[in-house]
Image (cartoon, rainbow, N blue to C red):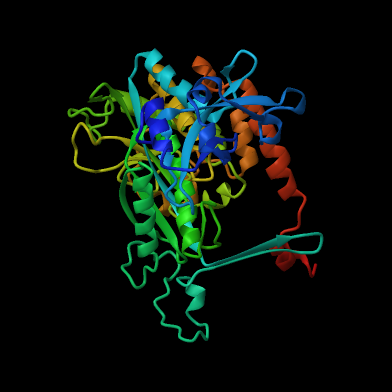
Amino acid sequence: MRTASIVDVLELASSVDMVDMRFTDLLGTWQHFTMPVDQLTEAVFSDGISFDGSSIRGFQEIEESDLILLPDPTTAFVDPVGDDPLLILLCNIHSPPGMERYSRDPRYVAQKAEAYLRETGIATEADIGPELEFFLFSDVQYEEGTNTAYYRVDSAEGWWQSGLDLQPNLGRQIQPKSGYFPVPPADRSQAVRTAIIRALGEAGVQVERHHHEVATAGQQEIDIHYDSLRRMADKVMIYKYVVKGVANQHDLAATFMPKPLFGDNGNGMHVHQSLWQDDVNLMYDGDSEYAFLSDVGRWYIGGLLAHAPAVLALAAPTTNSYKRLVPGFEAPTTLVYSQRNRSAIIRIPMVARRPETTHIEFRAPDPSSNPYLCFSALLMAGLDGVQNQIEPEEPLDTNIFHLSDEEASKYRHTPVTLDEALKALEADHDFLLQGDVFTKDLLDTFVAYKRANEIEPLRVRPHPHEFIQYFDV
């Protein structure tokens, strides 16, 4: 992430023995292969290296399997968590024989979204700042079969540890929903988070702060300094890799699963967004009657709210995501906006009111999403709002979690299942197709994969809770 030319990369490569070529599959997982450093030549940056696209989720069929990786020299960094010196390069995917860009490459979607933003003339850059939450567990077990299905996770911070006959049990476990900002020794992950930040710095990812999060058992947050859309998506992929690597070095398992614990907070990825015309923040208006938010900012919110159910198919894309998007755990489900109010799905944070700091925060996404697709979908929804001057309903500054059922029924809400979100995406996706940013083929492939490989397998399996409810009927 620190070099900008092929010459720079080849010079950096002289300090390592191996080179890792990495790309992101349709669902947001890094894939890679490794080669000796002497195989990295200038020709690789123009000719690329082929791989079998039919073996990657959501990519090619076997009869058209060949795809080609071209490394992006601006992304090179030395692995800060591996055992051996390793140069990592993020790659763009191309399709032979014409070497055109591959339409299902998530990184290409993000690059097209940025290009489309400039083509509209609305802005020259979108700045993105995500807050990724994750858990650190000391023990993880899960299994399923014809006659069994269970999971078990553990953490020394977990409230369930407080009554165990441990030798010694020093107490200081964190009660459910009480983990926000404790100091050590209650916060047992300070050293791990600090090690993660150092490793992220070595990889060129700037961090703003870190802290313990709300849940009882090892929930963490490390905030990345904002950047442009595609660069931030790259950084999110690096972030998740580094978090898992450093956790492993400390005999811990890191997970970005949205809802690993019942009855406690889950992992969100609040996404802060602003539009810029060169050095002018288009979301700021010093004369605005509400939160110094400009017309552009308000219309951007209007687009996000109008398309939120469809966007969430890409921003909260797992069946587990909708176990987080339930009332009562800080995950907002009501499609309204507000200043300061964390119970609204969109808020305008009340930081120091200056032109450079005004922005909006969309709080429904989670870190199981593919950041390239998630950030691009958010931008496309917001731009549709600006282009069509979509006016959101009046802001709601009361605690939405305290509304009566009758009052809450007056507002639109997030989907309650992944299948509902996918149906929303099928019904509302024209805004994503503008500028050929997303293609119908990519969206159809994404929806079909989710239904066949995630929704259907869960639908046909008994759940442990069903034994509690129904075994003795």
> Is residue 328 visible in this depiction of the protein?
no
In terms of image quadrants, where is residue 378? top left
Residue at x-position 47% and y-position 66% = 217
Task: Give the total number of marks visible in the rendering.
Answer: 0
**Image quadrant in which you'd find residue 313:** top right
411 or 414, which is in the foreground? Answer: 414
Q: Is residue 404 above or below residue 465?
A: above
Residue 381 appears anywhere in the view: yes
Q: Is 213 drawn above or below residue 38 in the view shown?
A: below
From the viewer's perspective, is 355 left or right of 329? left
Q: Residue at 64% x, 32% y: name it.
A: 446
Q: Is residue 451 left or right of residue 226?
A: right
Residue 438, position in %: x, y?
Answer: 55, 23
Where's the C terminus, which quadrant?
bottom right
Q: Is residue 266 above or below residue 173?
A: above
* Percent position of residue 198, x then y: 34, 52
Q: Residue at x 71, y 31 (%)?
A: 54
Image coordinates for residue 346, horizontal then vertical, percent: 39, 39
Q: x, y (%) of residue 83? A: 49, 54
Of 310 and 184, which appears nearest the observer? 184
Residue in front for this viewpoint, 29 or 415: 29
The quadrant of the rendering that contains the N terminus is top left
Q: In the visual, does 3 lie left or right of 278?
A: right
Give the camera-side residue of 57 and 172: 57
